Structures are given as C-alpha cells and as structure tokens.
Image (tube, grey):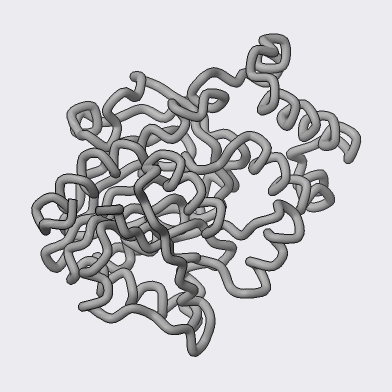
C-alpha cells in the first residue's frame, strides 16, 4: 500500500499566496513534492491550521496517516495568536496519535512548544540562506535522523526564531554557533517528533527566490551591500542549481554537496521516512 502522509502548512493564506506568486507553489506543495520524490509510493494530503475554520483531522484522522510533516512559517510562536495556537494544539494531537512526526524550522519550534518547551527570537540574530558548520552532538552522531551526515555540515535556512527552553523529554541532536538546537527529538504523550531548525526541503533556487521576495529589507539589514549584489548572488545560485558541476560558483559562495546535492541535502527527510515512517507503517499493517 502507498504511504499516506499529511503535510501541515504553517503559513496563513496570505503568506501562502505570496509564496505562490514568487515560487509558483506554496511551502506545503513544495514539501509534498520533495516527500513524493523521496518516496514515490507516497500520497500527500495538505492541511492549513492557520486558517480560521479550516477542516483539521481529529485524533482518529491523524492515526490514519503514516507520517505528519510541519512546514516553515512566517509566524512567530511568541506571538500566541489564534493562528499560532491552532497549530500548537494540532501538534499536541499528533503526539497523542503516535503517528511519526517531522518538521523543519517553524515545525521544530511548534513541536517544542507542544511538548512543553518554547520558542524565542534568536538573540544571535537572523540565520539566513545557509546554516554553517552544524555539528551533531554525541547523541546526534548515534541517532538515525542524522545518519550519513558529516562531523560538520551546512544546510539551507531562513529563520529569526529558535527553540528556547527545551521540552522535558528531549534529545538535542545538532547545534551551531547561531542556534543551540539545530536538530532534536522531542517526546510527548506517547509520541515522538524528529526535526531540524534548517530546511532540508529547500533547493538553492527556492532559497534564492525567498531572498528575492525581501531584497530591500535584506539590503537595509546589511545582508547585501546593494540590490545589484543581491541580484548577482540570486542569479548565481539559480544557475548552480541547474549546473551543479559549476565548481567556480560553488567555490565563490562556499557551497558544498551538503547543499548542492539534493540526495545529501534531504538526508534528514529520507532518514525519517526510512527509520520512522516505513517501520511504523509496517507495524500498523499498512506497508
């Protein structure tokens, strides 16, 4: 039987439409495409808990999924608005369902809050485009989520907030200078979450188009010297995505196969599918 996965979109309708205008798809659609490429037998449903009145699965509905994935978002957990709290409550229900649970960026923050931790504005500032020198902890080196990762690796990222206080039952799996929790496992109410602060689902082109949505603000914040510098970088990254053998471009921006090779970049998602989703589906008699 096919894997049945639920992709939970972290953004409001307005934010989703901004992404669609810039990228041609929403974050949940993009995540579903990555999942279906890694698991060709997967069928993905999408849900939108940030939208008031959205039709969300209950506990029994969540148990019917072989895995649940939570995307990134432009929202902030310290804001605690209704569109945020609906996602926290859904995450708590996912834990109770014991369905395998994964998330990127916003996803790890929501999973932390749902398990009794919190999320805060990063005192080190915004981590943008590439998270550098992510290092597995001792626990992370032995954990299947990071199987195949090097002793230090890079990954696409776009975030201002991070996990702050840790949930009571958790294992930190990786960190770097910008975020003490770059990968973790949280356990709550009989369920478990594997997740990362970065975005293994993002290609270079995806990151470039996200940055292009906010060039003026990034110039003002000092990430680019001017708009021409931004245009040059974004164009180069899109070109490198199409022509990964361009060693000159990879060298210019310090980008290695952790980022340019899709099979390596999506390591954590593939590991979650292999080590959590497929075994659980087999136990439940759906594989």
Q: Residue furthest front?
A: 1
At a point 24% along the width and 59% down the height, the residue shown is: 167
Question: Which of 67/217 is in front?
Answer: 67
- The image shows residue 181 at horizontal and vertical percentages of 36, 44
Q: Report the residue that reaches farthest toward the top.
A: 247
Q: Please state which of residues 161 and 52 is positioned toward the viewer in this rendering.
A: 52
Please identify the quarter of the rendering in which residue 85 is found.
Answer: bottom left
In this view, 200 is above or below 63: above
The answer to whether residue 124 is above or below residue 93 is: above
Is residue 41 visible to us here? yes
User: What is the tally of numbered marks visible in this picture?
Assistant: 0
For this rendering, which residue is in front, 190 or 186?
A: 190
Q: Where does the image place residue 53, in percent across and percent down from the top left?
A: 49, 89
- Residue 209 lies in quadrant: top right
Instruction: Please indicate whether residue 16 sits to the left or right of residue 249 in the image.
Output: left
Tell me the residue at 24%/53% (across/down). 1
Seen at 68% across and 37% down, the residue is: 205
Quarter of the image where one finds residue 101: bottom left
**169 to the left or right of 207:** left
At which x and y percent is residue 41? Answer: 35, 47
Q: Is residue 116 visible?
A: no
Residue found at x 62% / y 18%: 254
Eyeballing the image, is 142 above or below 28?
Answer: above
Residue 82 vs 180, above or below: the answer is below
Task: Tell me where residue 258 appears, x and y as whole percent.
Answer: 48, 24
| Residue 27 horizontal side relative to residue 2, left or right | right
| Front in this rendered view, residue 279 or 150 | 279
């Amino acid at each position: 039987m096919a894997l049945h996965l639920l992709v939970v979109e972290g953004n409001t309708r307005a934010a989703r439409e901004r992404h669609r205008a810039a990228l041609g798809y929403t974050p949940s659609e993009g995540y579903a495409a990555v999942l279906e490429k890694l698991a060709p037998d997967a069928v993905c449903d999408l849900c939108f808990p940030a939208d008031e009145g959205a039709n969300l699965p209950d506990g029994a509905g969540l148990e019917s999924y072989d895995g649940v994935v939570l995307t990134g978002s432009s929202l902030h957990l310290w804001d605690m608005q209704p569109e945020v709290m609906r996602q926290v409550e859904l995450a708590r229900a996912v834990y109770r369902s014991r369905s395998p649970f994964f998330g990127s960026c916003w996803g790890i923050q929501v999973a932390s809050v749902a398990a009794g931790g919190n999320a805060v504005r990063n005192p080190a500032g915004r981590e943008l485009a590439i998270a550098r020198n992510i290092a597995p902890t001792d626990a992370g080196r032995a954990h299947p989520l990071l199987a195949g990762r090097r002793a230090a690796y890079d990954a696409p990222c776009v975030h201002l907030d991070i996990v702050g206080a840790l949930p009571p039952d958790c294992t930190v799996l990786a960190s770097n200078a910008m975020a003490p929790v770059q990968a973790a496992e949280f356990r709550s109410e009989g369920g478990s979450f594997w997740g990362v602060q970065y975005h293994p689902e993002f290609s270079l082109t995806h990151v470039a188009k996200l940055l292009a949505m906010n060039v003026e603000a990034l110039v003002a914040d000092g990430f680019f010297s001017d708009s021409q510098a931004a245009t040059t970088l974004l164009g180069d990254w899109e070109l490198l995505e199409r022509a990964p053998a361009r060693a000159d471009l990879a060298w210019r921006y310090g980008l290695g196969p952790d980022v340019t090779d899709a099979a390596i970049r999506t390591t954590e998602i593939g590991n979650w599918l292999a080590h959590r989703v497929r075994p659980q589906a087999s136990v439940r008699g759906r594989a």
